Amino acid sequence: MPSRVVHHGDGVAFLARGRLPADHAIVTSLPDHSELPALGVAGWRTWFVDTVALACRAIAGDAVAIFYQTDVKHDGRWIDKAHLVLCGADAADSHALWHKVVCRVAPGTATFGRPAYAHMVCVSRARRLAPAASTPDVLPALGAMTWSRAMGAAACETAARFVASIGARAIVDPFCGHGSILAAANAHGLDAIGVELSRRRCARARQAMHESPPNRATEAQRH
């Protein structure tokens, strides 16, 4: 059975400890500026880019890091988080393998505060993908969310399935929230490691261990 461990702690400090094992991938969603108000928007942008770069350097050269991020409209301006992710990837000498758009609401719907879609960007330093490995670039629905800032179930499924397809053994989320991607990792037979600074969210992620869907590989063997 795949394992799941959730640490209460600082995700940045966790990433700074050193490189992860070669068969570990990162799938995460970095906090919005509203969650780090002491930094201010300009300080948060610098923190965001630096943290993406840190995550890219924490994985092995052939491993992948996937960032799920929703842009934000602030003070009449648009903050493009995909751009910030790619700035961090560039700083770590990494490149994009794919960039998917995840619809948060039905196309043609006006939204306020946050746009109608999210980005999911996969980066790596050394890995390349053949054209035959292409998958849909637009996810038509986000899927169920465990809380307002969660990575939707459909996005989690897409990320976990891709990580499993390239032979990784574990998914690491240094900002795991309620642990949605950790549950998806386990469902695909992958070990999961989460880090969460909030004690309440950390407890919720640990509780979710007992609410995960069955392991897909095990279910296939049963049938």
Image (spheres, rainbow, N blue to C red):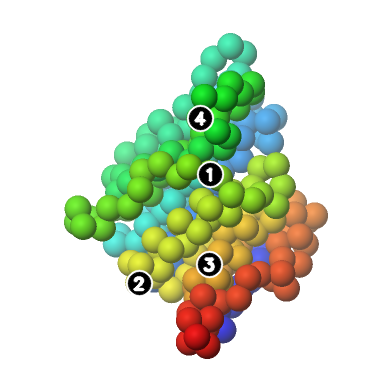
Q: Which of the two discs, 3 and 4, labels the residue nearer the N terminus?
A: 4
Q: Secondary structure at mark 4?
A: loop
Q: Nearer the viewer, mark 1 or mark 3?
A: 1
Q: Position of residue 139 (x, y in %)?
A: 45, 44
Q: Nearer the viewer, residue 154 or 67?
A: 154
Q: Residue at horizontal 71%, vertical 69%?
A: 211
When the figure is inspected, residue 39 is found, relative to residue 168, above or below; the finding is: above
Q: Position of residue 201 (x, y in %)?
A: 75, 54
Residue type, mark 4 in image: Pro
Q: Residue at horizontal 55%, vertical 71%?
A: 187
* Quarter placement of the N terminus: bottom right
Q: Nearer the viewer, mark 1 or mark 2?
A: 1
Q: Which of the two discs, 4 and 1, labels the residue nearer the N terminus?
A: 4
Q: What is the spatial separation of the Cα atoms under label 3 and label 4, in whole angstroms?
A: 29 Å
Q: Which residue is mark 3?
A: 185
Q: Which residue is mark 4?
A: 107
Q: Which residue is mark 2?
A: 167
Q: Which residue is mark 1?
A: 141
The local crowd at label 2, few if under 14, some if 14 to 19, many if 20 or more residues have their Cα within 10 Å, is: few
